[in-house]
Image (spheres, rainbow, N blue to C red):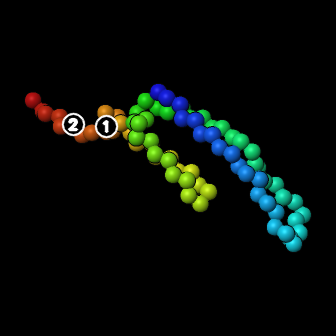
């Protein structure tokens, strides 16, 4: 089992000049998230991509943890 830790920083967005805001609430600053990984994850094959504000993680299963079909012989 392992732990996947994601660290990042949200930058403070600049307000548009000439715009009138009644209320603006945006989270900014540093953040940390940790996730415990099951033993079935192939840790050396984890991939991460960040596009259009979305972080996508791919955590493939190790070969021995994938389901497989076993033929049962009837005697």
Q: Residues within 10 Å of mark 1 (few under 14, many from 20)?
A: few
Q: Position of residue 30 (x, y in %)?
A: 71, 42
Q: Is residue 5 left or right of residue 72?
A: right
The C terminus is located in which quarter?
top left
Q: Residues within 10 Å of mark 2 (few under 14, many from 20)?
A: few
Q: Is residue 56 left or right of residue 60?
A: right
Q: Residue at x 53, y 31 (%)?
A: 3
Q: Earlier in the sequence, mark 1 or mark 2?
A: 1
Q: Position of residue 28 (x, y in %)?
A: 75, 48
| Label annotation for residue 63 | 1
The residue closer to the viewer here, 17 or 21, is 17
Point out the residue furthest to the top here: 1
Q: Position of residue 49 (x, y in %)?
A: 51, 52
Q: Residue at x 24, y 40 (%)?
A: 69
Name the residue beneath numbered marker 2: 70
Q: Is residue 28 above or below residue 1?
A: below
Q: Is residue 17 left or right of residue 45?
A: right
Q: Residue at x 76, y 49 (%)?
A: 27
Q: Is residue 23 left or right of residue 54?
A: right
Point out the residue furthest to the left here: 75
């Amino acid at each position: 089992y392992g732990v996947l830790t994601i660290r990042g920083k949200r930058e403070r967005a600049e307000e548009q000049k000439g715009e009138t805001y009644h209320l603006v609430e945006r989270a900014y600053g540093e953040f940390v998230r940790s996730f415990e990984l099951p033993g079935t994850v192939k840790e050396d094959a984890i991939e991460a991509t960040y596009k259009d504000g979305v972080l996508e993680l791919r955590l493939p299963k190790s070969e021995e943890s994938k389901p497989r079909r076993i033929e049962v012989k009837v005697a």
